[in-house]
Image: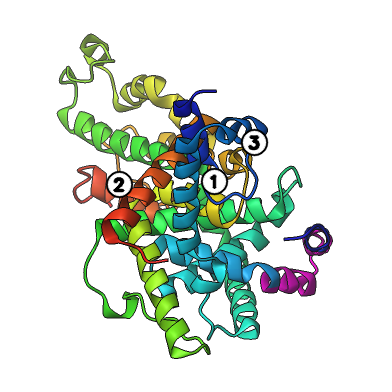
Amino acid sequence: MNKSGKEEIDELVARAITGDKTAFSEVVRRLMNPVVALIYRMTGERESAVDLSQESFVAAWQKLKTYRGESKFESWLFAIAANKTLNFIKARDRHRGDSPENTPIELATTDTPETEMVQSELRENVLNFMESLPAQQRLVFNLRFYRQLSFEEISVTTGKALGTVKTNYREAVKKLRRVALEKGWKS
Amino acid sequence: MNCQLCQDELLLCAGQDRLPDDIITHMKSCPLCREVWREIKAVSERLGSDNEFVPLDIDADQFVSDVHRKIEVISLRDGASAHRPARTDQVTWMGWSRYLSAAAAILLLVGISMIGSWKGERYADTGSVDSDSFAGLNGSTALLSLYESEVDQFDDAVLGVILSDFGDNGYFEASELLLNDLSAEELQYLEENFDVGELL
């Protein structure tokens, strides 16, 4: 997100804090994709990703007055989304069972069949890799790799010590290299 | 910087475009670490970006509308819970102290009934009341002796009712005033947690 984009978000958030629902709607529009994508990679479930994303924005609206601007709004929002997602994963893992409606489905695209095949294989590889990581490593990896947060920001977002966050990321990348080699990920 | 440190740092740089200066300096003269970085970059490129993980069939307007609908539902629910009947709020506010007062009152009623029917027999099982103090005492004095150990649990109104109901007959008839003062929840609590027999 470029600087002007960040500044726009900050202005919208400032208005939303005063109760401006229109401003909040715009915040939702701008950040829904990264939030949905994060949760989808974390859970591997499309429907759950959409529901949890919406719940995250609802929670953000309710807690908006507690946002002090000490961290980026995106980081603050991701902290809420991460909390909800980790709770969801914990509950799901306790009651794991086959549920057809929650089986990861192919994401529709308008690209050519060849591109779609490549993207589908990429998604499958990534989701399988994510599934192999402990939930906390999965979260740290997502925030660092896909959202480009600094380790300090991730430490604040997750509430974990800086050293722990770095160790989580290091271990996730080590596993990534092993998996890519074993599974023969194609470039 | 040695290779071990460099490669540890390279793991932390996976997905980043820029490398720290000391890493770059080390790699200029280290083909092994350059190869490790090349491999990390190649794997990173196979992870895609957010674009591959956002369902294209999600309608942004519908998504935003759903968020606001859920906010509205929660607001209505929170508003409804703020308008519960006052009695419930009062019981909730007073918490356990209310139940304890009522429980203590009922226990004393039962105890006093038993004492009255014994008429002068020593009451030796209270643990906190000296059995000798009951020898030859009439009901009112016995009642007061018991109250002294429990009086902190009662407010003046409850205590007054109990005292006025305890006559000189030596036995106690449960006061309708006292029982009517108890809410349905309190009565249920007493029934569930104490053996009050026919008293209620």
| Residue closest to the eye, B7 or B87 | B7
Q: Is residue B114 visible?
A: yes
Judge depth for marks 2 and 3 and give the one in front. Answer: 3
Residue A70 in picture, x, y percent from top left = 74, 42
Type of the residue with mark 2: Leu
Q: Nearer the viewer, residue B36 or B47?
A: B36
**Where is residue B140, by image quadrant?**
top left
Q: Circle 2 sits on which residue?
A: B190
The first of marks 2 and 3 along the sequence is 3
Extent of the magenta region: A10-29
Residue B93: say if magenta.
Answer: no
Instruction: Give me the residue at 53% from left, 43% from top.
Output: A158
In three-dimensional space, the C-alpha distance between marks 3 and 1, rounded to whole angstroms, equals: 60 Å
Q: Residues within 10 Å of mark 3 (few under 14, many from 20)?
A: few
Magenta segment main secondary structure: helix
Pointer 3 residue: B20
- Residue, x 38% and y 51% (percent of image)? A176
Report the amino acid beneath label 1.
Trp
**In the rendered image, the vertical position of residue A34 relative to residue A149, given as above or below:** below
Q: Mark 3 and mark 1, same subunit?
A: yes
Instruction: Identify the residue shown where x is 64% and y is 36%.
Output: B20
Instruction: Determine which residue is flagged by label 1.
Output: B93
